[in-house]
Image: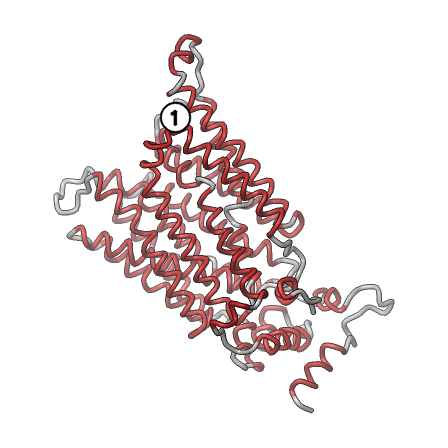
Amino acid sequence: MDRGAERRRLLDDEDGLTDPTGVISVQDAYLSKVRNSRLYLATLVSVLGPMSFGFVLGYSSPAIPELTRISNPELRLNDVEASWFGSVVTLGAAGGGLLGGWMVEKVGRKLSLMFCSLPFVFGFTLIIAAQKLWMFYLGRVLTGLASGVTSLVVPLYISEMAHERVRGTLGSCVQLMVVLGIMGVYLAGLFLDWRWLAIVCSIPPTLLMVCMCFMPESPRFLLSQGKRREAEEALLFLRGPDAPVEWECARIEDACEEQGSSFQVSDLKDPGVYKPLLIGVMMMMFQQLTGINAIMFYAENIFQQAHFKQSDLASVIVSLIQVVFTAVAALIMDKAGRKLLLVISGIAMAISTTAFGVYFYVITELHLLASQTNADLSWLPLASMCVFIMGFALGWGPIPWLVMSEIFPVKVRGFASAVCVLTNWTMAFIITKTFQDMMTTMTSAGTFWLFASMCVLNVIFTVVFVPETKGRTLEQIEAIFRGTSGP
């Protein structure tokens, strides 16, 4: 019997996959035999990468104040140097997105994750051993490069390992671990100096490299390479010994053969490719256009105006809000669905950024009116910031990365994900670097009202264009864009 006939037999054969009454579907019957413990273990190991990514993002906040005051003139940062110390990570991450797109196709998801541990560790080692400013910058670029690779590879790895019942929850763990990493480095920064903080930050990527040696490669990547036996072994590890993995393997292999083996530029004419690519790129743009970097930029000033004098403690409070609501999003993702959370998130951010604009308008344009009425408006930016962070963490923080990992056909996942990651980090750099100019030319109120209008647009975009992926297999999601019925 040839391979195609054998696969069709497996897909058609429901023996052992339905209950005696025939009430439940083949897919549900299969999932009832799945055990998730090792899937959770593989996910836990892989999200050490996003935790490392969070350490990189958070490191500059506690380190820069100390580095601007140290006695060594060779390492002391001025305002311009401190700005580059914080922002050069985004340039490295943009390059990492491109590198990650190439790596996941050439060496696979598992080896890409192991290799990206090296620039994390080398980057922090350069910072620890720094004797000149260039060592700081190169260390930050290397850790940014690793962060870019991680932000692409880990969502793909998790989405290709997980089944549809838990894919949303496990995929949301990527953003959860990022914000946990940020909070962790803020907390550690209360007690450690910048060198010891860098040493602590190098621990998660070291663990990632070691532990990934014992985890399987993505079954979908193995099947795209024609390695069926290895794919079945990976699925047995992830689904447990009782699951008839030959059925899932045949389903994935069937979808891989329909698409062809490798990506060609001509594939961009295929609606099953260009539609999800456009949606992924727009979601990454909208994530940055919500104003998340502006809100975080103002966080310290907002807490000071609300009489929180310890700015380092304020950073911990902000990161704690992010962690709590990102965890809430992870818990409800596979029940509430992606679209509903995106809409709620967009509305919450639109309201809060509008309130920010009102606050800045009152204290600048209507300063006299505020002083005459003795109005204390410090509660308004504080409340607005909390609502914004909660809204972002519920939807537009984790979901664009999750959807990016779900909507692309397997043969274009590397290329399309690289484009999305490059878009995200490029937009982050542009908005961070032009924010002060926007505040000058458009006023503070106008800038935040612009962000509010972007949040309204992202709600409309979500309702009209973003498909609901909850409860669907990756092959069924691909079928939506192809305009065919799912497998």
| Of the pair 396 and 73, the residue shown nearer to us | 396
Q: In the image, what residue occupies the spot 64% across and 50% down? A: 337
With respect to residue 344, does 89 lie above or below?
below
Residue 332 as seen in the image, left or right of residue 69 = right
Q: In the image, what residue occupies the spot 42% across and 43% down? A: 183
With respect to residue 53, does 297 lie above or below?
above
Q: In the image, what residue occupies the spot 15% across and 52% down? A: 132
Residue farthest top in this picture:
372
Q: In the image, what residue occupies the spot 31% across and 60% down? A: 121
Quadrant assignment, res 291: top left
With respect to residue 182, does 232 lie above or below?
below
Coordinates of residue 50 in the picture (x, y in percent): 44, 55
| Of the pair 58 and 33, the residue shown nearer to us | 58
Element under disc 1: loop
Coordinates of residue 68 in the picture (x, y in percent): 21, 39
Residue carrying label 1: 308
| Of the pair 460 and 218, the residue shown nearer to us | 460
Residue 470 as seen in the image, left or right of residue 160 = right
Coordinates of residue 319 in the picture (x, y in percent): 44, 40
Total numbered badges shown on the rendered structure = 1
